[in-house]
Image (cartoon, rainbow, N blue to C red):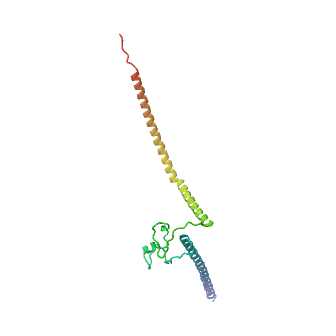
């Protein structure tokens, strides 16, 4: 009887632990889902703010009409249109600022107006450009100091030094030959052959 009772108590304990684990896992999943939903909403808000900033930058005024979004990602095929429709869309930034670039449907084209920009935007542009230059310089230095590059440069320097030495030796030999030829010519012209006077 005690074995049956012990077995049932152990089985009840294992069941309770399993139930508590499932509940805990459910709570963790719900919290994670809520956090993900909040982050997704924040990302959507940030995207909307960036689109508004882009529209302001492209049109020059925040009150200018904005063409309606297609609601899909450019470059992907969907049931609403094909890839060519997407490539002519609002969000292809490779065509920004080009003369003769295709104009999105419903967008009014305005000539760029030279206007003062606020200090924060100027600082942002300057810092980004500086950061890009610094990153590219860092990449170049890192690549230049890589062992393969150093070995290749060392090899090329040695080869160039050897070629230069060989060329100098050949020039020196040629100069000696010319000098000896001139000396022989000078000796042959200036001297009169001795005559035997008997």
Left/right placement of residue 112 relative to residue 23 reads: left
| Image quarter of residue 18 | bottom right
Which sits in the foreground, 5 or 184? 184
Which sits in the foreground, 144 or 146? 144
Q: Where's the C terminus, which quadrant? A: top left
- Say which residue appears at 42% left-offset and 28% top-offset: 180
- Say which residue appears at 44% left-offset and 36% top-offset: 171
Q: Position of residue 119 (x, y in %)?
A: 62, 65
Left/right placement of residue 82 relative to residue 135 reads: left
Q: Where's the N terminus, which quadrant? A: bottom right
Q: Position of residue 83 (x, y in %)?
A: 43, 74
Classify 2 as above or below 194: below
Q: Position of residue 102 (x, y in %)?
A: 45, 70
Please tell me how many numbered marks the rendered image carries. 0
Which sits in the foreground, 100 or 78? 100
| Image quarter of residue 118 | bottom right
| Image quarter of residue 9 | bottom right
- Say which residue appears at 47% left-offset and 41% top-offset: 164
Which sits in the foreground, 27 or 23? 27
Q: Position of residue 78 (x, y in %)?
A: 45, 77
Looking at this view, name the residue that lies furthest to the bottom.
1
Classify 183 as above or below 73: above
């Amino acid at each position: 009887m005690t074995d049956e009772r012990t077995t049932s108590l152990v089985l009840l304990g294992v069941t309770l632990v399993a139930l508590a684990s499932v509940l805990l896992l459910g709570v963790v999943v719900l919290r994670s889902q809520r956090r993900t939903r909040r982050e997704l909403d924040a990302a959507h808000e940030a995207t909307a703010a960036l689109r508004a900033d882009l529209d302001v930058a492209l049109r020059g005024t925040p009150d200018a009409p904005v063409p309606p979004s297609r609601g899909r990602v450019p470059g992907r095929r969907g049931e609403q249109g094909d890839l060519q429709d997407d490539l002519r869309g609002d969000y292809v930034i490779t065509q920004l600022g080009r003369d003769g670039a295709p104009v999105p449907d419903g967008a009014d084209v305005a000539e760029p107006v030279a206007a003062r920009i606020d200090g924060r935007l100027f600082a942002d542009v300057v810092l980004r450009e500086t950061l890009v230059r610094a990153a590219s310089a860092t990449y170049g230095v890192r690549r230049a100091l890589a062992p393969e590059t150093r070995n290749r440069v060392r090899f090329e320097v040695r080869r160039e030094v050897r070629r230069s030495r060989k060329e100098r030796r050949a020039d020196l030999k040629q100069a000696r030959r010319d000098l000896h030829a001139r000396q022989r010519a000078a000796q042959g012209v200036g001297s009169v052959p001795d005559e035997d006077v008997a």
